Amino acid sequence: MSLELRIRLARRHGGFSQASLAAAVGVQRSAVSHWEASPGKSPSAAHLREIAMATGVQFEWLATGRGKMNLSQEVEMDSIAAAEALLVDDPLELRLISAFRDSSPRARVPLVEIAEELAGSRVGRPRGTGRT
């Protein structure tokens, strides 16, 4: 089964129109249309991850066609992606991570640049010289 067809099946499985999936992923509707077209353009890994999360299908199935489309209820809670796990004890750090995740894709780069600028000026390091 082609990637284009898996994306279309995932979208329908999640009950999304092309426009509503595009909004959930943070892209234009035309991007979803291109992803579902044959031959279509392939979405980035980050967009595939967002599609999988929004539609409730397994990332591996969506990206490769291997495995099952979705997990059984008893396995679902044990399969939380490491990227989604929050190992944060500091409430301010948690607020920063939440603000980043809640922001639009276009706003994320400026947010990171602002945080880097503030961190650099706070400890006396010029911008662009990270820790080694």
Image: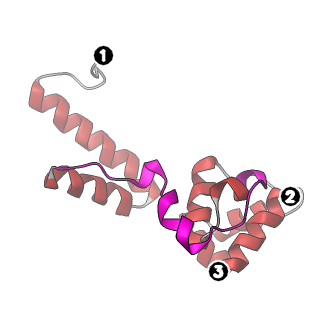
**Image height of 122 relative to 4, above or below:** above
The residue nearer to you, when weighing 108 against 57, is: 57
The numbered dot on residue 132 is: 1
Mark positioned earlier in the residue sequence (3 or 2): 2
The numbered dot on residue 2 is: 2
Q: Is residue 53 left or right of residue 48?
A: left
Image label count: 3
Q: Is residue 3 visible?
A: yes
Which amino acid type corresponds to the residue marked 3 in the rendered image? Answer: Phe
The numbered dot on residue 105 is: none
Closer to the eye: label 3 or 2: 2
Q: Indicate the position of residue 124 as horizontal and vertical percent values.
A: 11, 23
Extreme residue in the top direction? 132
What span is in magenta? 63-89
**Image height of 128 relative to 53, above or below:** above
Check if mark 2's residue and mark 1's residue have beta carbons within 8 Å: no
Helix, strand or loop status at disc 3:
loop
Residue positioned 64% across, 67% down in the render: 57
Q: Is residue 27 visible?
A: no
Q: Is residue 94 left or right of residue 72?
A: left
Judging by the rendered image, the residue that carries numbered circle 3 is 16
Q: In terms of image quadrants, where is residue 67? A: bottom right
Q: Is residue 43 left or right of residue 98?
A: right
Helix, strand or loop status at disc 1:
loop
